[in-house]
């Protein structure tokens, strides 16, 4: 353990760097807290994106079933998003049917906010979607 002071001419003089550990800790601690907060925010953004995409895919699968309608797919996607990340993220959901070659496809599009600070951020920035092939029971 180092002494708190240097002895010169029989008297104890304070060292020039005494107390600098507190300042260093404050600077490094705040920097590490900022890095941790940024890492958590990136994780939250990825979670929201993956949840919304997965909900859109589930809604498209629901809407593509033979005995279901596009409204059923929209309702399911909305419910899944609302339960997972909040109602604010499920306000703009559209379901469309299109033909790609000989295959009919249902697409669920969700325009959702980008979470910048926690779950808050600018509205309807991301446009995420999920698709599914329509079930055809009349096909041989």
Image: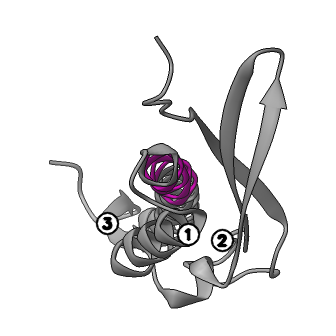
The secondary structure type at the circle numbered 2 is: loop
- How far from the left and from the top, in percent, is residue 58? 42, 50
Q: Residue at x 42, y 68 (%)?
A: 76
Instruction: Pick whichever of labels 1 and 2 is earlier in the sequence.
Output: 1
Q: Which of the 4 image quarters holds residue 100?
A: top right
Q: Which residue is mark 2?
A: 115
Q: Which residues are magenta?
A: 48-61
The answer to whether residue 19 is visible is no
Residue, far left: 1
Q: Residue at x 82, y 80 (%)?
A: 122
Q: Which residue is mark 3?
A: 10
Q: Which secondary structure dominates the residues rendered in magenta?
A: helix
Residue, far top: 140
The secondary structure type at the circle numbered 3 is: loop
- How far from the left and from the top, in percent, is residue 13? 43, 71
The secondary structure type at the circle numbered 1 is: helix
Q: How is the image coloured?
A: one colour
Real-space Cα separation, disc 3 to disc 2, in angstroms: 63 Å
Q: Which residue is mark 1?
A: 74
Q: Residues within 10 Å of mark 1 (few under 14, many from 20)?
A: many
Q: Which of the 4 image quarters holds residue 82?
A: bottom left
- How far from the left and from the top, in percent, is residue 6? 37, 58
Camera-side mark, 1 or 2: 1
Real-space Cα separation, disc 3 to disc 1, in angstroms: 85 Å
Note whether 39 is above or below 95 in the view shown.
above
Q: Residues within 10 Å of mark 2 (few under 14, many from 20)?
A: many
Note whether 120 is above or below 69 in the view shown.
below
């Amino acid at each position: 353990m180092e002494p708190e002071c240097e002895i010169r001419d029989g008297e104890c003089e304070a060292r020039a760097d005494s107390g600098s550990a507190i300042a260093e800790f404050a600077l490094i601690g705040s920097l590490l807290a900022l890095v941790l907060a940024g890492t958590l925010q990136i994780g939250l953004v990825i979670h929201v994106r993956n949840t919304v995409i997965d909900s859109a895919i589930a809604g498209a699968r629901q809407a593509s079933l033979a005995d279901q309608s596009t409204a059923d797919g929209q309702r399911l996607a909305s419910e899944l998003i609302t339960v997972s990340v909040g109602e604010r993220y499920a306000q703009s959901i559209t379901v469309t049917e299109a033909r790609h070659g000989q295959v009919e496809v249902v697409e669920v599009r969700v325009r959702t906010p980008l979470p910048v600070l926690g779950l808050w951020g600018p509205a309807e920035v991301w446009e995420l979607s999920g698709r599914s092939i329509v079930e055809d029971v009349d096909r041989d």
